[in-house]
Amino acid sequence: MSANGDTPKVELRGVKKRFGAKVVLDGLDLTIPHGQSIVVIGGSGTGKSVMIKCVLGILRPEEGQIFVDGEEVTRLRGRARDAYLRKFGMLFQGAALFDSLPVWENVAFGLIQGRGVPRMQARDIAIEKLAKVGLGSDVAMLSPAELSGGMQKRVGLARAIAADPDIIFFDEPTTGLDPIMADVINDLIVSTVKDLGVTTLSITHDMVSARKIADRIAMLYKGKIIWNGPTAEIDHSGNPYVDQFIHGSAVGPIQMEVRA
Amino acid sequence: MNPFATIGRVVLRFFEEAGRLSIFGAASVTGVVRPPVYWWLIAQQMMRIGFYSLPVVGLTAFFTGGVLALQIYNGASRYGAESFVPVVVLVGITRELGPVIAGLMVAGRVAAAIAAEIGTMRVTEQIDALTTLSTNPIKYLVVPRLVAAVICMPILVAIADSIGVFGGYVASVESLAFNGSVYMNNTMNNVTWDDVSSGLIKSAVFGFIIALLGCYNGFNSKGGAQGVGNATTNAVVTSSILILAANYLLTNLLFNK
């Protein structure tokens, strides 16, 4: 298969993953078309993070296949995996900045270590990417611990876009931020995605964020995608699970496992 | 509860851990010989593991040497064999106490620090972030610490040997009325390469154990602050036990040299 417009950018087919006796992903199918922003919603502990980690090869699924640009990547290891991971940028939930390095080296890390860009050149790129997320060059020399949560998320976003990836994953981009900073981050995500023309996959339980950044929304429940459609249709999905989730009601078909 | 089931579970758990540790160790060792090599990180770790351990190791070696002289004098004087004190201190420090004391002190200092640092990186997803930035976490985090520890421990122990013998000298001259020049002569005439080298070989192995157990426990820590705390404790306890076990095996192996 070639990487033409018809080939989905990322495709998961029947992915199953369990930890011990606990089945987390139970035959998950998801297609992410080229250049689209997909948001996967779902409650806490439904396996959203596990799904992303399977695509990135951090976790290995027991069954199923994962394709990136039509090429199977499910069982790649070592250098082959490092090579395909260059297509990805990832914004982690807690930003996951390296606290031993200054901000600019965090942003430039993938360039210096992964691609062998000279440090001075990588530093210039880092400062340029920081400007894209609204941070001045004075922030570049600070340590990540000196930044607020919102600024850390921005640095994380700058690091995710530093190496001009084709695909960016956002893991709970607005969790732990106040509503205004959450909106700033959402705007940043939308504008960077438009600028770069990338494909994105986000996972969140924040419906405001999901509506803002998604072209399509998919809902993950009990290890499967139970609904998948354009963002505009989410209010008329006709799916009781989706309705319960987007209205945030404790009453409905989804019973919280309070005692997990 | 069925006692056999409990014993079985413990045994299985032990072999599972041993297997995981072996796989982790093998991946780390192959990481040493494969590019890229992070020279700067190795230098940084040598500073943290080696240089900053000097005060701790030096002080413990000094007092251990002094105590050794006093206690050997106590025993030897019963047979009028006081003149053996310098030789026994020398052999005891270089073959045994230098490497073991330094190993245990560095285990407490370095294995704990490594486990806490890497464990925190694990629970804050920094290790996953390394992977997504096309950087192998084993090569970036484990290999520099492993190489630095294996290089630094013999150097630390060589210094600890000298300071330990000096501690014995000070105790003998100050408290036991030995003649300083006679003590020194007696010591220098009895220094053999076999005594010193067997201690240095041991210490390199101890360095490997310390860094590997620190990294392994850090990598496998789970679930927040408590998980990192457990990883740190496990790193110190398991590396200390393994150092003492390896010490016995290596002493057996190097005994006749």
Image (cartoon, rainbow, N blue to C red):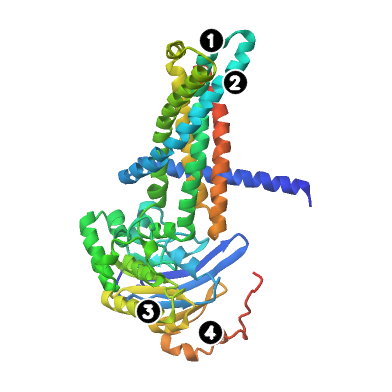
Secondary structure at badge 3 equals: helix
Q: How far apart are marks 3 and 4 (CA)?
A: 22 Å
Secondary structure at badge 1 equals: helix
Q: Which amino acid does label 2 sit on?
A: Gln
Q: How far apart are marks 2 and 4 (CA)?
A: 78 Å
Asked if marks 2 and 4 touch (Cβ < 8 Å), the reply is no
Of A105 and A234, which appears nearest the observer?
A105
Q: Name the residue under label 2.
A: B71
Q: Name the residue under label 1.
A: B83
Do the residues indicated by labels 3 and 4 lie within the same chain of the protein?
Answer: yes
Q: Mark 4 points at which residue?
A: A242
Q: How crowded is mark 2: few (under 14 residues within 10 Å), some or many (20 or more)?
A: few
Q: How far apart are marks 3 and 1 (CA)?
A: 81 Å
Q: In terms of sequence position, does the residue under pointer 3 or pointer 4 come before the other?
A: 3
Asked if marks 3 and 4 touch (Cβ < 8 Å), the reply is no
Of B119 and A231, which appears nearest the observer?
B119
Tell me the mark number nearer the camera, choosing from 3 and 4: 3
Q: Name the residue under label 3.
A: A186
Q: Residues within 10 Å of mark 1 (few under 14, many from 20)?
A: some
Tell me the mark number nearer the camera, choosing from 3 and 1: 1
Q: Is residue B75 above or below residue A246?
A: above
Q: Which quadrant would the N terminus of chain A be assigned to in this image? A: bottom left
Asked if marks 4 and 1 touch (Cβ < 8 Å), the reply is no
Q: In terms of sequence position, does the residue under pointer 2 or pointer 1 come before the other?
A: 2
Q: Which amino acid does label 4 sit on?
A: Val
Question: Horizontal and vertical percent for residue A73?
Answer: 40, 61
> At 48% across and 38% down in the image, what residue appears?
B106
Q: Distance between the residues labelled 4 and 1?
A: 88 Å
Q: How crowded is mark 4: few (under 14 residues within 10 Å), some or many (20 or more)?
A: many
Q: Is residue A207 above or below residue B28?
A: below
Q: Distance between the residues labelled 2 and 3?
A: 72 Å
